[in-house]
Image (spheres, rainbow, N blue to C red):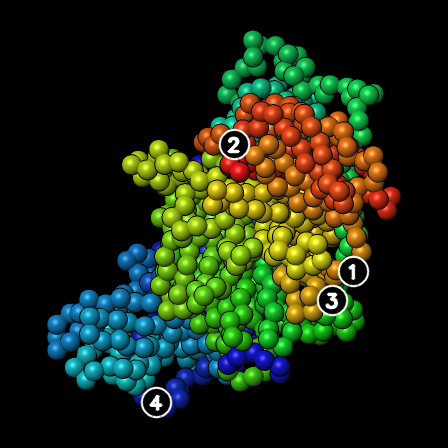
Amino acid sequence: MKYYSGKKEWITIKCTFFLLGCIFLISCTSSPSEQIREKGNRPIDPWALRSVLDLRPRILTLALDSECYLAYDLNACGLYRAWKGGVNWDGTVYTETKVAQPTSWGKDYFLNPSPQESWLLEQNGRKQEVTTRFQGYRFENGQVYLKYKLTTEKDTIFLEERPEFIRDDQGNPGLERVFMTQGMDGNLSITLHTKPKAIKLENNTTTISRTFFKKIPDQVRPIGPKDSENLGKYWMERSDCFTCHEWSEKTVGPGFQQIAEKYPEDKITVDLLVKKIKEGGSGVWGEAVMNPHPNLEDSNLKAMVSYILSLNHKDSINGNPNLEKKAIVNKPHSTETEVLRPGFGSSLSDVHPSYNLQTINLEGIEFKVGGLAFLPDGRLLVSSWTPQGEVYILEGVETGDSTQIKIKTMAKGLAEPLGLAVVEGEIFVLQKQELTQLIDHDGDGITDEYRSICNSFDVSMDFHEFAFGLVYKDGYFYANLSMPMRLMSNEKPLPDRGKTLKIAKDGSYEEVIYGLRTPNGIGIGVDEELFVTDNQGQWLPANKFIHVRSGDFHGMRWGLPDSLQGLKMVPPAVWLPQNEIANSPSEPSLLYDGPYKNQMIFGDVTHGGIKRVFLETVNGSYQGAVFRFTQGLNVGINRIRRGPDGALYAGGVGMGGGWGWNETRYGLQRLKYNEKVTFEMLAIRSKPYGFEIEFTEPLGIGQGDSPADYSLEQWWYKPTKSYGGPKMDLEVLKASETKVSANRKKVHLTIPGLKKEHVVKFNLNPELRSMNRQNLWSSEAWYTLNNIPKN
């Protein structure tokens, strides 16, 4: 129905298969005589949840009863296990742990280890090659129906399965599986090979399988952190340590063993390092900045530092612990150090003067925004990066008044939904491991069917394998797949990772661009072209704003075959220097407002705020400048959408430490253009002699006429296997001549020594004033000079 108005140590779980009781296979259409549990009384809400489970991707967990959980492996279209106990919902979205994933706990009724359940099709007694595909699930009368498609060379069979918890007359727990088939030829038979006994399905009718078990005693959840043997390690896994550190090798920061070998294991060192972690900083191990952690308790930090120092298997360097202590003494700050003002060497702090800001606050709702989209009637859809994986419908957002906004949960149980799209009134959501359509069959505003559109792209159990999006353009969906981050030395990323995919409605897909790392943003921009952002890291010396052109390689070399290791990276349209203008860039969007029309913006989850991008075409390729645009927001921005009312809706997300701005975690806000003029650089254009800077309003008389008003630097980036990278051949440039246009809105700078494939940073005199005596909003810009125009 359309919506209109109305290197890592992994935990190994040891499981022993057992089955007690008996199994009945019945073909019937009548209700079963056993006492089926009262439907709708599930132990958790939502009781159907998508996730990784027990190191397996694409699992659907069904909490049928406190006595019975089921886990379906959707890759195999079969039941993986049935057990009494529960799930440790651990990981980024659940407990802010960057390495862990959910695991089951308790005792199995039965387990289908590899090889798992498999389907056998026979035609006149001859086996047929069969392909299985999970097609989603639907809810009816409080029960769930799983949908599969089985395909042979000649036949396509559609099949539904309805599982339910039951008891026999003696109160023993049981599992009922009801199968319904369609499209079966009379000479065709289907058998599900499972434990303990195969199930043969009847043609085009209903087959019921019932299994009863002996009762299992109540199960106890595994030991919590306070009883853990390595509490420090536990807290490290619960924090953001593994974002920037590995066990032994330096990445963003030093390896833990390197730290342990550098410092003595004593109270002075522990206290010193606790202070360092809490306050943040740089300089001991290089220029990389460690985020402050003011919200972490000293007791947690001491446990973490003590555990790290315990990893030392060597004596202190030269046996002199005092030498090590001196290494971390901070240098005193010069009294002449310039204090940077927001927008003038540091991030902005306020809302852009040309926009009015309103915050959407609804009681009991924390908007950890994974996706935004608008329905044809103007209602706003919000997907939430939470354990429950909700999608909300908000009505009345155009008022900007939270008291006038109505909200309804239309879907839940999704796995990290980080993209939404509405196509002709139909709603699509991009989960971590599937593109799904949400269908409301009865018109009550609640999803009845979660239809799988595409679930065949490569996935593993790695926590960092996100799916980012979602864009619909010219009959296709576009989505980004990030790289895994915790591979063992003998592992490589799966083939589809680090790519932008083009997905058809029939679920088929193709690669568009590749060599991406963490591309948390895709959007339609200038000239109706697609643009993607990517995050600094290995093989990415800085963040990127990328124009999507089919076949382009963008630098990340993990997983490339040896034959392609020499492949040259296509430069981004705009480089986004790390911690100067970006850190974790997110969704790009097109502006329609005033002088900024046809420019682009993007948010940033960690650096915070919204940045503006001016693009031009030089020698057939996009390049341009990035500017600070607005801050004053209540969270790091993850998604931006323009509403039917012309306002910008910005939603954010965070999880503390390295994945968030100022340790904020949620927020949804509305920015409406107010037509006020803000004095700032509007555009920077490359010229054969240098650059042209255009301002939003005229410069004051005598303002900006001198080359001294323009500080300039240029450098280039060299991708390496290390995390990030320095500015190569950094040099200061000087304008030899300035010429202000007659209307005083443009300045032409003649700059000797400019080099293509370099970044040029502009830093204007902060005392510049407009003709109306307005101060500059921000003095800085970064232009990516991929090409110098010939004419």
Kindly identify which residue carries mark 3: 362
Percent from the top left, x then y, of residue 410? Answer: 59, 73
CB contact under 8 Å: marks 3 and 2: no
Q: Earlier in the sequence, mark 2 or mark 4?
A: 4
Closest to the observer, 594 or 718: 594
Q: Is residue 439 shown left or right of residue 667?
A: left
Where, by quadrant of the figure, is residue 325 drawn? top right
Amino acid marked by disc 1: Asn
Percent from the top left, x then y, of residue 28? Answer: 31, 88
Mark 2: secondary structure = loop
Kindly identify which residue carries mark 1: 674
Percent from the top left, x then y, of residue 57? Answer: 42, 56
Closest to the observer, 463 or 467: 467
Question: Residue sitting at 64 percent across and 63 percent down?
Answer: 642
> Distance from label 3 to label 4 (Cα)?
47 Å
Front tag of 3 and 4: 3
Front tag of 2 and 1: 2
Amino acid marked by disc 4: Thr
Percent from the top left, x then y, of residue 726? Answer: 56, 27
CB contact under 8 Å: marks 1 and 4: no
Kindly identify which residue carries mark 2: 756
Q: Earlier in the sequence, mark 1 or mark 4?
A: 4
